[in-house]
Amino acid sequence: MIRFSDVTFTYDGAGRPTLDRVDLTVGEGELCVVVGPTGSGKTTLLRAVNGLVPHFTGGRLVGEVLVDGRSTRDFPPRELADVVGMVGQNPAASFVTDVVEDELAYTMENLGLAPDVMRRRVEDALDLLSLHELRNRPLAILSGGQQQRVAIGAVLTASPRVLVLDEPTSALDPAAAEEVLSSLTRLVHDLGLTVLLAEHRLERVLHFADSVVLIPGDGRTLVVGPAAEVMRDSPVAPPLVDLGRLAGWSPLPLSVRDARRQTGPLRLRLEGAVPSQTPPVDPEAPVEARLSKASVHYDRVVALDVVSLEVRAGEVVAIMGRNGSGKSTLLSQLAGVRPPTSGTVAVGGVDPSSLAPQALVARVGLVPQDAGIILYSNSVGSECAAADRDTGLRPGTTAAVLERVLPGLPIDRHPRDLSEGQRLALALAIVLAPAPPLLLLDEPTRGLDYSGKARLVRLLAGLAASGHAVLIATHDVELVAQVATRAVVLAEGEVVADGPARDVVCHSPVFAPQVAKALAPDPWLTVDEIRDALHLETVDG
Amino acid sequence: MAGAASRTTNPILLLLIAGVVVYVVAARRTSAPWSRSIVVFLRLGVIVIVLRVLLVIVFGIRLPGHVLFTLPHIPLPAWAAGVSIGGPVTAEAIILAAVQGLRLAVVLVCFGAANSLASPYRLLRCLPAMLYEAGVAITVSLSFAPELVMAIGDVRQARRLRGRPTRGLSGLRGTAVPVLERALDRSLQLASSMDARGYGRRVPISRGVRRWAGSATAVGILTLLAGIYGVLVAGSLPGGGIPFVAVGAVLLGAGLATSGRRTNRTRYRPDLWRLSEWMVSASGAVVVGSLVAAALVGDPGIEFSVYPLASPTLPLLAVVGILVGLVPAWAAPEPTTGVILPNDLGQGPVAESEAGMPPVPHQVAHGHDGAPETLVPVVLPGGAVP
């Protein structure tokens, strides 16, 4: 169905090709997952399928991409719209109309389908993706999961043979991601659709995959094959695969169900061991952030409802909850974006919304969801210099912090050309330079690969140990398992759970990480913990 | 309503129009993001009035009358005759300025109301196929404005996170560049998305036909322009330019229709023109009609004069006509998304108009309690009097 023959693609002005001699065949009715480190060319590969690369992006493509027998050389993207449905990284940015139903019909209108056909297909898509209750909603007020489903529906109505999705679950909470992915599998099974999707959070998609395309990224050639085989020595792997490698399981488990069947021997080896306890937070440590009975209303929407919360120095608190449950609002409250509707918010004893920008950044640093939004300069070096000037620091402070966060970032690079992880590191360095005692991160692992995530985990743990209080709003349960000392779950703006991360996470079917699910009821969270425990065992024995 | 507002200077009528518009919006607005634009336009209206009065106080033409206070006069050279800075400020001048400002403000509120109730995309769907491409360009640029407002909010917030000033001149300069950058990014994404979804697919048509369509459109536009010139400048073209207008329009229409055949688009669930749509448009026509009629009859209440300075009178015909503008609050189809009950919001604007206009309340109250059927017959004979 999709065939790349010896495709090499180079962006204009780039030194080396992004895709290098790619040979790839994806059969009809296959769900194929594209994996690889950040910046390895996953998005480029996907966009080449419907010809956006190179028709829209420019650059030079050698070789041939065939989709359903049509070559992207002869057919521009608009002429392939009836064969390939493309859903980009940010669905909200791809919406052309403003109401769900119109958006679903847009592609068909362009294809010139008869009105009765359109009507029938829109109704089908509404049912298939459970969107019927949203049909007249404006797109702008939908939640992330709903927007993602609408974006998929909008390309499905043209009844394409191929669906291409770029990180379809990166913005979604675990439950919404599950919902989107199960809709996709249903389409593959029922309609024989061919699906090609790229994703960083492999723990979410791998068990749905028929095949995996691994782009190693450092000039090595593509690896294509069944998921379990490709994963054996993939540089990116979900925790379950890591666990399987550690325990020497074969075949490697891809789903929690596979893993549970093989856990017997591992459980025996782990018997008697307990996860190394995170040291309890000093109850005398200063309270860095405090919300007391804070409520926030936007118009008629209650974003936070009488929330009381205290965060002490040395804590890493994960704020979890579904899309729209008030996580970002909570962070923006602590960053003083606006005063609460009622109740009080204090950072280091002061109301943050009353502080002038300069005084604010010395007390609290917020890295927003889209780290790029706080970067404006045209190079990494001038960005650091500007940060020193803004906050009245000694010149060179920010650059020194950046060197600690991510050594060796080229200072003449434009922030736009950095990878997601590099951009995050730069934003983090800028925010950390004035040494605020309270650090807030909104969804920091979006677009980060596993090595980038591991680096972030080490950095955050180091910051907490040196007396910073860290608050992370995230959907990434694996990140929570690795770094959080405490977890707070929000629902409809209320705190529904607050306690040590291990207790909160292990007891929730939605928020439990893969390792916890595989080894339940034993309270293990991460592969590292198990590695440590096994290591101790062998030393004792 | 905007047309009606530009035809009167009576402040009572203007306030009444604004009240009617706000009430209709409150009754029929949706929870969509664009529905808040009326608030922005209301604020803009207030700013216009204040600015207008201030300008008259400082620079205005010196009208004779009751002198309220005198500003120091700054003499200007002879070539700036007609403009003066400072001098005596009269009550008449201020009131006249305020009323003129009010008229502009009410027109703005009417536009805001249109923006609140209809989305630009919906208007696009009403366009004939041959104008579709031009329409897309317009709607994309229309949707640019709200995107821009959102981007400004984001960037200001981000600047605060960086510890940079968000206000003042340097704040403004630092905001503008990233805002434009983001808006540009967004348009590129939109373009790629539209391309990937089949926008601009062509049906092959022969080269000759394409050439014919192109030249017909060009010649049509030229003839039409010449014709309009002829109509405006009497005696410059034979027949007053009317034949030119006709020929130009026909050519332009034919050219566009032919090139429109190249785009093979269909329309999903086009908006139907039903009774309620007729009622809404008719009510608008009645409002304008009543003011035009009142002017024809020579009703003195339409024009508000400051000589002699007197409180404005209330022309009955125009008031009744404007109240017909309330009809859409009931007649228009219920918004299908997130309906806000008129009871929650409608009371505010009504109370406001009551406070502003002593003689009106019982009529508004009547309209509010009564069904639209009773309101229409009461009004129509009034409108039909002239």
Image (tube, grey):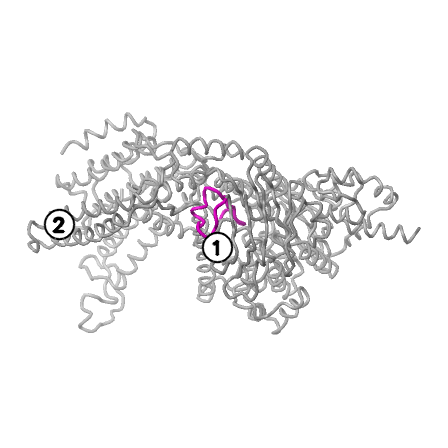
- On the image, the x and y values in percent for residue A541 come to 93, 50
The answer to whether residue B293 is visible is: yes
Query: Is tag 2's residue or tag 1's residue first in the polypeptide sequence?
Result: 1
Question: SS for tag 1?
Answer: helix
- Which mark, by number, is residue B209? none
Span shown in magenta: A69-92
What residue do we see at 86% from left, 53% from top?
A: A535
The residue carrying pointer 2 sits among few (fewer than 14), some (14 to 19) or many (20 or more) residues within 10 Å by Cα, namely: many
Which chain letter goes with mark 1?
B
Q: Is residue B174 left or right of residue B214?
A: right
Of A106 and A406, nearer the camera is: A106
Report which residue position mark 1 lands on: B153
- On the image, the x and y values in percent for residue B124 come to 34, 43
The residue carrying pointer 1 sits among few (fewer than 14), some (14 to 19) or many (20 or more) residues within 10 Å by Cα, namely: few
Instruction: Pick the quarter of the image with the C terminus of chain B.
Output: top left
Report which residue position mark 2 lands on: B244
Q: Is residue B17 left or right of residue A264?
A: left
